Each structure stands twice: as structure tokens, then as C-alpha cells.
Amino acid sequence: MQTMAIEGSRSMARVSFKLATLVFGALLAGVVLAQGAKVSSPVELARRADALKPGQWVWAPRIAPSGPVLVYVDLSRQVATIYRNGVRIGVSTVSTGKPGHATPTGVFTILEKNVEHHSNAYNNASMPYQQRLTWDGVALHAGGLPGYPESHGCVHLPYAFARELFDATRRGTTVVVTGDASHAVTTDSADVLAPSAVVGEQAGEFWAPERAASGPVTIVISRSDQAVVVLRNGVEIGRARAALPADSDATHVLTLGTGATGAPAWFYVGVAGHANESGRPVDEAVRNRVQVAPDFYAKVAPLLLPGTTLLVTAEPLSQGDAGTPLTVLNGREDAPRSGER
């Protein structure tokens, strides 16, 4: 009887241990879900932002290392897209306002930034990497990501993504919030180019460097469109046809530097999923696979200075117009702070 009692106790202990392990595992999974993935997903996953699972994100800032930043939050798809110099450099799942606490839509500017902010309205809740959009409490910050809207109006981001975004923005950065969280829609991925960069002469060829007289230059070549776009300081200044093989879905980022002989040369940049390419020069055979009209190249050539970035993508350059104008919300420093959170 004593032996049976001991064995029974051991069995109960094993069961209790297993249950505790399962409970701890479930709690840990909840923590991971709340915090989001710690590392970026491969850059190709940004092609279909809808394929990102809650907490997943893509961050490839070297695609456009400098230039103005735009944050575009789509409530319908629960996705945030980050553009720099008019080119997408990041995509992340988000969680926005739940029913009764809807996240407002419109065009905002970041009013203040705080790494370790705590809510004044919701039990001193932690709001890491907070970037305030309104003085009454709406902000971007790291938070829970259950896969559906569940915040009190803020835009929740994965913790590691929120940290990266915090470092990339500044006070005054534009944040566009659009869509309807209560009516989710299934759409294609966000445009390669920022909405403000694809209006106007989207389909036609043109060259208008006067649109942006100075600033960082980024060149985008689309395999699907067989076209090349030139952006300066986030503004599209030129577009033309480009012929290149459409035999790959891989995304490649290159930067213009100086080769071994001292002549200008293109080098691969290692982005998420392509770290092994970093620093490798582009050989002659690869360059010959891309054909651009000589007269257009002659116009672009003077802009090709060290640090110029080239993005080769399978994505279309745009997927329709930029939509109807959005309300511009008050972002003045002297705006009322009543109810600040």
C-alpha cells in the first residue's frame, strides 16, 4: 500500500509538472505574442503584408538610408507601412482601437517621443517607445498584438519594431491613419512607393528634376512593371521604361560606392533575408541584364553620387491612386493638453 501511495504521489507530481509546464508555455507564448517577433522577417515577406502573422514585421532601413519618413497605418488591414525617401523600408502588424475606442483617421505629426512613457489614464500602463499623435492620448507604441483591434485608441506595435521605428522618426514626422478597423478588407500589399510619391504621372514617362532640387536619391526598378522610378528627397522626379528579366521574386538593394580601381561601382546591401550579399560588387553580366534608354540614363547619371541607393523589386510600383484627401488634424504645440495620457 505504501509503495502504491508513493507511486501515486510520483504520478501526481509528474502530472502537476506537465500541467505547470503547459501553463508556463502558454503564458510564455502570450508574452511572445504581446511583444512580437524579436527579429525582422525576410524582406520578401513585405510583398504580401497580409501574410504577416500577429507580431511579425519586416525592417530594411538600408533600402533608403536617408530622406523624409512617412508612417502609413491601415486600420482595415491592421498593418503599418514605413516609407523613407518615398520607398517602403518596413511593414508591421499592429493592433489599433477596439470598439468604443476607435483610432482616429487622418494625417498627424509626431508631437513628442518618450522611450519609457506610462499612461496617465489606464492604470499607469507601460507604453514603451511612445510617439504621441494627439494630446488627448493617441500614440504609436509597443503593445499587445492579439491579431485584432484591442487598444484604447493607440497603435500597438511589436516591441523590437517600435524601437527601430522610434530611432528612425523625429518630432514632426508625418503619420497617416486610414481605413476602418471594424470592416477588415483583404487587399494586396502596400505600394513600393509612398502614396504621396505615386500620384500624378504614374504610368507615363517623364523627367522633372525641378520637383525636388536637392536631397537623397533612390532609384527603384520594378520587374513586374518593367519600369524605373527616380526619387529625390521623397519626391518622384523621373520615370521610364526598363527591360530586365522577370525570372526572380528576390529583392535586391544596392548602393553606389568606389570600386578597387577607384571608379564608381554598385555594391549589394545586406537586408533581411539577404545578409550574405552585403558588400558584394555587382558584376558586368548582371548589369547587362538591365536595359534603360540611353537618353534617360544620361539625365540620371549626374545624380549618381556615392550613397545613391538602388532597389530592384518584383513588386509593381503602385497599385491604384492614392485615394481621397484626408483630414489634416491639428498638430500645433499650443494645442490643448486636457485629458493627456
Image (cartoon, rainbow, N blue to C red):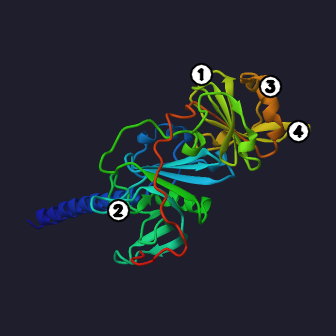
Task: Look at the numbered disc 1 and give the secondary structure of its residue.
Answer: loop
Q: Earlier in the sequence, mark 1 or mark 3?
A: 1
Total numbered circles: 4
How busy is the neighbourhood of tag 4: few (under 14 within 10 Å), some, or many (20 plus)? Answer: few
Q: CA distance from mark 1 to mark 3?
A: 26 Å
Q: Earlier in the sequence, mark 2 or mark 1?
A: 2
Mark 4 sits on what residue? 260
Q: Position of residue 37 (x, y in %)?
A: 46, 53
Q: Nearer the viewer, mark 2 or mark 1?
A: 2
Q: Earlier in the sequence, mark 2 or mark 3?
A: 2
* Amino acid tagged 3: Asp
Mark 1 sits on what residue? 247
* Amino acid tagged 1: Asp
How busy is the neighbourhood of tag 1: few (under 14 within 10 Å), some, or many (20 plus)? Answer: few
Task: Look at the numbered disc 3 and give the secondary structure of its residue.
Answer: helix
Mark 3 sits on what residue? 295
Q: Position of residue 113 (x, y in %)?
A: 55, 69
